[in-house]
Structures are given as structure tokens and as C-alpha cells.
Amino acid sequence: MNRVERLVSVAKKDSRRIIGLMSGTSLDAIDAAMVVIRGHGADAEIELEHFRSFPFPQKIRGAVSDLFRPERARVDQICRYDFILGELFAAAVLRLCEETKTKPAKVDLVAAAGQTIWHDPEPVVVQADVAWIDHPIETRSTFAIGQSAVIAERTGIITIGDLRVRDVAAGGQGAPLVPYFDWVLLRHKKRGRCIQNIGGIGNVTYIPPNGTWDDVIAFDTGPGNMIIDELAYVMTNGKQTFDVDGTLAASGHVHEDLLQTWMADPYFTKAPPKTTGRELFGAQFARRIRAESNGVSPEDLIATATALTAESIARAYRDFIADRGPIDEVLLAGGGANNPTLVQMLRVRMPKADIKKYTASEAKEAMAMAMIANDSVAGMHTNVAGATGGRPTVLGKICL
């Protein structure tokens, strides 16, 4: 069986074993989920077999962090770390196989969105100025590293990579991608659900009661853990890369004047579809608010940054979701779901919603990547127009 025949065979199977990989804006770890998915589309069933979160090697994390900053990123480093991260992703796949005593040949697909280093979802127009192009070039852009060709070569497993870019080519924001997974698995006949991921950036999927594919809306609510993480790192002189159990925020007080100043950022009033990232709410934002907050203790600054995440989520629900249907449940996923101080701030701001942690919280986004790959090999559309704004399309690049 040649590789193309193998791909066709995988697509036609009743079920597929897939390893989904996710590396988020926090750049703290590579999340790897081994799942078995039966069927395709709305009736698919997914079983989580194993999940591991592999910490980034510190030197590589620091080098990749530099790539997020245009004034420090160099094209040779971007090229090099595209392949280095491919090696890391491949190593995570092979280690997951080793831990589960699963031969790589028994894994049908690897799904990898890559590590986004720059995200520019606003349209840009460029004049071509050549006779053979009779129109201006208008495009959005996003760029992730973690070469899927390396993953396929090292593991021998068909790899579906670079999952965001086809949606951008189709006029979308390239994110969030998880709403497809959310709608397939978490829609409910009687309850309106917000599925809120709190990673480096916060994003929400809203599915009204008995919601159809066209009823789904999803967007980035704003900062998740990214600003908190940066402040915790500085406050502890590098001993902590995040606020463990929300204890730093719990020891401080929220400065309402600062909170309202930060909430005046135009992103929060922009209507969906919308996405954001490190470019807006990353280290630069954290450095700026430290500089502008003379006299505010580090504990108070972290408490206020935590309140910013909670307030931006609650306000997004009020402004962009409440008129679409009831919010009966809020299912929390991502690292922020493990921060009791942040969760309590959310409960105070949304007293009528049943806020609880999603069962497979840490694994959810990696599982979502696997679900996209599962249906992409069947030629199915897996981007949600109400999330990205893109035309329906098949996501990912296939490396045989």
C-alpha cells in the first residue's frame, strides 16, 4: 500500500487513532492527546486514551519567545526553529506512543496546529503593479512554526499540520478552531452553553439550546493567563512561570481604576468575529502596565490582571452573547480553569450561570485538533463561520 492509498484507507475506517498536538500562546508546554474517534462529523464519538503535557525545554522556550517580538526576531532563527519545534512535536508523539505501548504504525494521524508566532487577522491591501494581475492583493495572515514535514518524517505517521492557514485564505481569522469540536460534542438540547478556554488568550464558544451549526458563535474574549504569567514571572524573579493556584492574586487587591483603564482597550468593544494574541496582550502589555502602575504592589497588580481576564470574559458575554440565547452553563477549560481566584472572580460577575470545569479541561484543545484532522481527511468542512468569519473549507496540510 503506497502512502496515498494509506490516506484513503484511514479516511474510510470506522474509527481512527489520532494524536492531537497543541502549543498555545503561553508557550509553557506541548499538550498531546491520544484519542480514538469513531465516525465523522456531527455524529462522531471521541474517546481520550492518554494525555500528557510536555514542558518546553527552557532554552528553546526563550529562543521562541524572542520570535514573538518583531524587533528581535530574525529570519534565520524563524527558519531554524520551525524545524526544531517540528522535532519537539515529533518527540512528544513518540514518547506518547512509548508510554502507552502503542506502535506508531497503530496511530492513523497526527494533528498539529503549530506554534503561532505572529497573527495578523486584519485585512491588508497590496498593489501588485504588474500587468498580469489586474486587481489589488487583499489578504489576512497568520504564521506558525513546527514543521509538519519533520513530524511525519520522524514518526512515520500521516500528519495534518498548519491547521489555521486555510481558514485565513478563505477570508477568516484562522481562530478559534475549537468551536467545531465544541459543537460536535457539547451541544445540548435544552441548555445554552459557553465553553470558555482560558489559555494564554481566552476564547469562548457559545451554543444556544438545540443549536445548529449556523447558530454557533465563537471568538477570543481577550487575555487569559498571558499577562498574569508574565507578572508572576517578574514578581517571583523567575521562580514561577504562572500564578500557582491563584495565590499571588488572592494576596492582593483589585484596583478598579486600573481595571477600567485597561478595559478601555478598543479590542473589548470590537464585534466578533475577532481574534487576538501575544501581539496585543503579551509581554509588551505587561511591561506597559507595570510602567504605568507606579506605587501599586506586585500582588495588587496580579490581582488586577486576574480581574481583567474575568471582567473581559463577563463583558464579552454581556455584549455579544446574551442577546443570542440563555447562558445556562459555562464550561471552563485550559490552565485558567485551575486558578480558584480567577474562577471566583468569574462567578461574582456571572452569578446566574452554572460555572464548572470541563471534564478533560487540559486535553480539550489537543483533542479538538484531532477532531479537525479526523474530518479533514474525509474532505469535510471544519471551520465555523460564526467563529472565524471564513468561508467553509477543509483545514490543514497533509504530509504523507
Image (cartoon, rainbow, N blue to C red):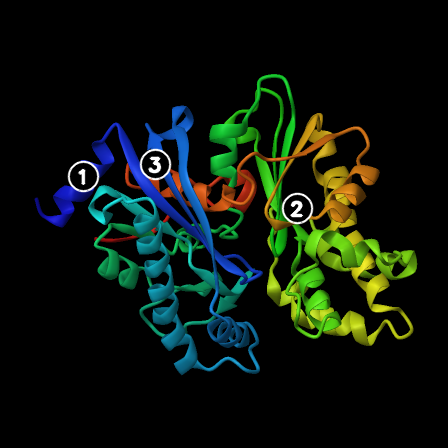
Position of residue 333 in the picture relative to residue 234 (left or right): left
Camera-side residue of 130 and 197: 197
Position of residue 303 in the picture relative to residue 223 (left or right): right
Local packing at callout 1 (Cα closer than 10 Å; few below 14, some 14-19, many 20+) is few
From where the camera sits, is residue 349 visible?
Answer: yes
Q: Which residue is mark 1?
A: 8
Question: Mark on residue 338?
Answer: 2
What residue lies at 61% left-to-right and 67% top-to-bottom? 279
Describe the element under mark 3 as helix, strand or loop: loop
In three-dimensional space, the C-alpha distance between marks 3 and 2, rounded to whole angstroms, equals 34 Å
Q: Which residue is mark 3?
A: 380
What residue lies at 80% left-to-right and 56% top-to-bottom? 249
Mark found first going from the N terminus, 1 or 3: 1
Q: Nearer the viewer, mark 2 or mark 1?
A: 2
Camera-side residue of 245 and 372: 245
- Which amino acid type corresponds to the residue marked 2 in the rendered image? Asn
State yes or no: discs 1 and 3 in contact (Cβ < 8 Å): no
> Height in image: 283 above or below 265?
below
Describe the element under mark 2 as helix, strand or loop: helix
In three-dimensional space, the C-alpha distance between marks 2 and 1, rounded to whole angstroms, equals 41 Å
> Height in image: 213 above or below 161?
above
State yes or no: discs 2 and 1 in contact (Cβ < 8 Å): no
What residue lies at 61% left-to-right and 50% top-to-bottom? 335
Q: Nearer the viewer, mark 3 or mark 2?
A: 2
- Which amino acid type corresponds to the residue marked 3 in the rendered image? Met
What residue lies at 34% left-to-right and 34% top-to-bottom? 36
Q: Nearer the viewer, mark 1 or mark 3?
A: 1
Describe the element under mark 1 as helix, strand or loop: helix
